[in-house]
Amino acid sequence: MKTIKKIAVFTSGGDSPGMNAAVRAVVRTAINNDLSVVGVRFGYQGMIDDDLVDLHDHSVSNIIQRGGTILKSARSKDFRAREGREKAVENLKKANVDAIVAIGGDGTFRGATELNEEFGIPVIGVPGTIDNDLSGTDETIGYDTAMNTAMDAIDKIRDTADAHDRLFLVEVMGREAGFIALETGIATGAELILLPEAVSRIDDVRESLSEVFRVQRRSSLVIVAEGDETGGAIKLAENLKEDFEKYEMRVSVLGHIQRGGSPTSRDRVLASRLGSAAVQALVDGHTNVMVGVVNNQTKLTPMKNTWAKKKSLNYELLELAKVLS
Ligand code: F6P
């Protein structure tokens, strides 16, 4: 295998708080190992457009606390075509890049795997997504911050819900995964949590809510994951309107607020560990793997297994939520 002298790092897909801390760790660990680093701006699209910048020690000063990503992010349609990937590789070769560190979620890792399998470029993945839906790591970078942001917002909603004795349907992010919904639901004492991983029939939802109102005639919070089969909080509210006419119902969709903000300490530390472990993995000759932290130990997982093996929710927590609500 060719000795690695220069690596490229990029962030891609939906941004997540802590991506900057990961970029910082990649750059500083690389420099520590006498490697030079370029940053690719706007993910795979930037690779195609030749949007590369040299990164030095000082380039990543004062970013560990910042949300978003200094390297910008994008979802690239062009990269899905072979032609786009060829262009991207041509630009990487022109810049003498020997290996890449890809920070993002499953879409990012699929792209990195293609670069590795089609063109032989060594790649390492760093899990950065608020969804926490990647196998091979207990938590992804940004998940903890997103949960805390959602919890903080929902606590505030609870205050006003309580003041008016209202029923609130709060939608949190997670198109295909209910990790954010489940944990914030428990943390905010929600009366009901609806997730893509558990069947939510509208009749069951009606029944559960009627039961809630039968025992307690006061405010109620329902946390709905964006990808729940009831169709999200707005659609659910339309379907419940008639049955719960006498309770004032309100909907709040938290949306992208969950993606922004300064990362929590836990996310900063996780991102620092993973960014550094990614460079170490390359130096040690690994490729096409994702670095994760499992039971507080860094672990390498074949890239494909991170999305092909669906990460399971902790169903005990779902049961706990039912008991405690
Ligand atoms: O994957 C992160 C995520 O925030 C999902 O929870 C959400 O469904 C999606 O991205 C939204 O993507 P976009 O910002 O492109 O609308």
Image (cartoon, rainbow, N blue to C red):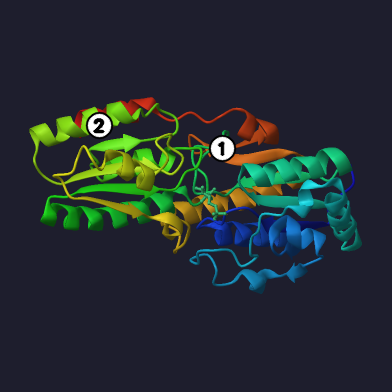
In the rendered view, tell whether residue 99 sits above or below residue 138: below
* Residue drawn 10% across the image and 32% down it: 214
| Residue 314 percent location from the top left of the image | 40, 29
Q: Which residue type does callout 2 highlight?
A: Arg
Asked if disc 2 and disc 1 are in contact, CB closer than 8 Å, the reply is no
Looking at the image, tell me whether mark 2 or mark 1 is earlier in sequence order.
Answer: 1
Q: In the image, what residue type sits under mark 1?
A: Leu
The residue under the point 71% across, 65% down is: 41
Most foreground residue, 176 or 111: 176
Instruction: Write down the quadrant of residue 220 in the picture.
Output: top left
Tag 1 residue: 134
Image quadrant holding the C terminus, namely: top left
- Which of the 4 image quarters holds residue 182? top left
**Where does residue 81 sit, x and y in percent of width and height?**
82, 47
Q: What x and y, as percent, mark residue 227? A: 46, 40
The reply, left or right, for residue 80 in relation to residue 181 is right
Lateral position of residue 67 relative to residue 104, left or right: left
Residue matched to label 2: 206
Q: Is 274 drawn above or below residue 137 in the view shown?
A: below
